[in-house]
Image (spheres, rainbow, N blue to C red):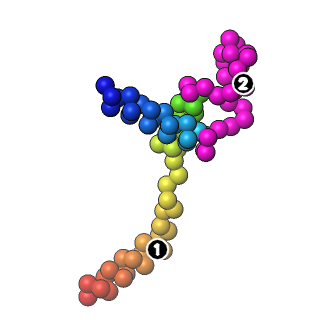
Amino acid sequence: MNRTWAFGMYIYTLVVLWYALHGHRSGIVADRRVHAPWYLPKTDSSFADMLTTLRRTLIAARFMGSRPAQPTNAEIRQVQRACALAAA
């Protein structure tokens, strides 16, 4: 039980730090007010807002992540020639 609590606080800290450094946008609270009208007096992001932002960022990175630049056909042929010359 003690380890579970410590791990939970560790993850909580990581999420809050990530949000503070990379995830915070000025419109998050306004968006939340629009989608949840009972949050009208809300002024700061909640932990649920932080988790939602992190989840959306991870999903976007997974499915829409940029791949490293693909080699051009000329670069591929150059490597093939070099391999052929080394084998000869």
Kind of residue indicated by mark 1: Glu
Residue 49 spot, x, y in % from top left: 59, 27
Task: Give the residue displayed 56% in from the left and 27% down from the top.
Answer: 47
Crowding at dot 2, Cα within 10 Å, few <14 / some 14-19 / many 20+, comes out as: few
- Quadrant of the frame with the C terminus: bottom left
State the residue position of label 1: 75
Q: Secondary structure at mark 1?
A: helix
Within-10-Å neighbours for mark 1: few <14, some 14–19, many 20+ = few
In three-dimensional space, the C-alpha distance between marks 1 and 2, rounded to whole angstroms, equals: 54 Å
Residue 34 vs residue 78: left or right? right
Examine the rendering and report whether any part of residue 57 can be seen: yes
The disc label shown at residue 43, or none: 2
Q: Position of residue 67 (x, y in %)?
A: 49, 55
The answer to whether 54 is drawn above or below residue 22 in the figure is: above
Label 2: element kind: loop
Q: Going by the picture, which residue comes out furthest to the top?
A: 38
Give the side of residue 38 with respect to residue 72, left or right. Answer: right
| Residue drawn at x 53%, y 52% as measured from the top left | 66
Q: Residue at x 72, y 24 (%)?
A: 43
Which quadrant of the rendered structure holds the N terminus?
top left
Q: Nearer the viewer, residue 67 or 76?
A: 67
Q: Is residue 77 left or right of residue 3?
A: right
Horizontal and vertical percent for residue 71?
A: 47, 67
Q: Earlier in the sequence, mark 1 or mark 2?
A: 2
Question: Vertical placement of 62 versus 40: above or below?
Answer: below
Q: Is residue 61 above or below residue 36?
A: below
**Residue 26's quadrant in the figure?**
top right
User: At 32% across and 32% down in the image, what residue appears?
Assistant: 3
Query: Is 5 positioned to the left or the right of 26 in the image?
Result: left
Q: Can you tell which mark lies on residue 61?
A: none
- Span highlighted in magenta in the image: 20-48
- In the image, residue 33 lies at what x, y percent? 70, 19
